Image (spheres, rainbow, N blue to C red):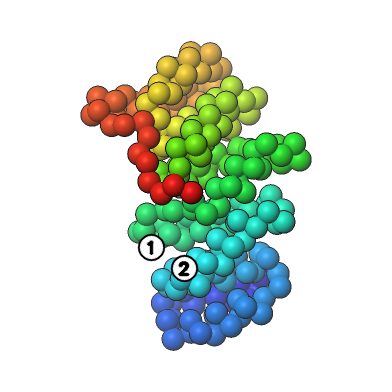
Amino acid sequence: MVRGFAALELNEQHDYVAIPAIEDALSNESDTTARISIAASLVGMDDPVGEQNLEALCSDKTQPAETTIRATFTLANAQRARQKPVTTLKCADVVLSLFDNPNATSERSSILLLLPGMYHNASKDKADRMIAIAQSMLGDISTVARMRAGEALAEMGSTDSIELIRSAMQREPNNNARQGFQRNLDDLQKLQQQGAPTYTQGQVN
């Protein structure tokens, strides 16, 4: 972890001269958590090696669920920090497979946070799957999961989910969640009024 923190510190200092040394450290790093941190620092310095390494981790079916989710989160956050469009589509197959894994049910709430970054460039089949996942979580036992489901549907621009969110809001016992659903509805109804399509097809994968 110390090596990962050191790489992130060099990124914060915009020490681009250190990029070759950071790449070397990444290639020799065996600890997965440190690798993710080091790769994130390279993404922050616009080095494609960092993005390639995070994509390799998040798309590796042999990695534990925690690693897949952390690598995907880190990739999205690093891109966002550089004010780039968040594109984590290469993580989609493994992330979506986790939702069906009976040994990864505790990760489902976290998966909801990852869907918007994969959605807009996904194939139609994958995009539909992401919407279906979020819709199914509107009735989850966890309040946090229900709120994240509404947020994911709003971020993905799923105007077809308006009535489902409205129904979820009407039966929601938690006041904060109801307020969240109302914001989601407001955002989606605004899109609907603007005539925005439910799905914007991008890269077919």
Q: Position of residue 81 (x, y in %)?
A: 41, 60
Going 43% across and 59% down the picture, which residue do you hit? 79
Q: Nearer the viewer, residue 168 or 129?
A: 129
Kindly indicate the quadrant of the structure image that contains residue 26: bottom right
Q: Position of residue 186 (x, y in %)?
A: 33, 26
Q: Note whether 162 is above or below 104 in the view shown.
A: above
Element type where label 1 sits in the image: loop
Q: Note whether 18 is above or below 40 in the view shown.
A: below
Residue 68 in view, yes or no: yes
* Circle count: 2
Quarter that holds the N terminus: bottom right
Element type where label 2 sits in the image: helix
Q: Note whether 38 is above or below 91 in the view shown.
A: below
Q: Amino acid at mark 1?
A: Arg
Going 35% across and 59% down the picture, which residue do you hit? 83
Point out which mark residue 183 bears.
none
Q: Which residue is mark 2?
A: 43
Residue 182 in view, yes or no: no
Kindly indicate the quadrant of the structure image that contains residue 63: bottom right
Evaluate if marks 1 and 2 touch, with contact meaning CB atoms under 8 Å apart: yes
First in sequence, mark 1 or 2: give its number. 2
Q: Amino acid at mark 2?
A: Val
Q: Nearer the viewer, residue 73 or 3?
A: 73
Going 45% across and 42% down the picture, which residue do you hit? 123
Q: Position of residue 128 (x, y in %)?
A: 48, 33
Q: Residues within 10 Å of mark 2 (few under 14, many from 20)?
A: many
Q: Which residue is mark 1?
A: 82
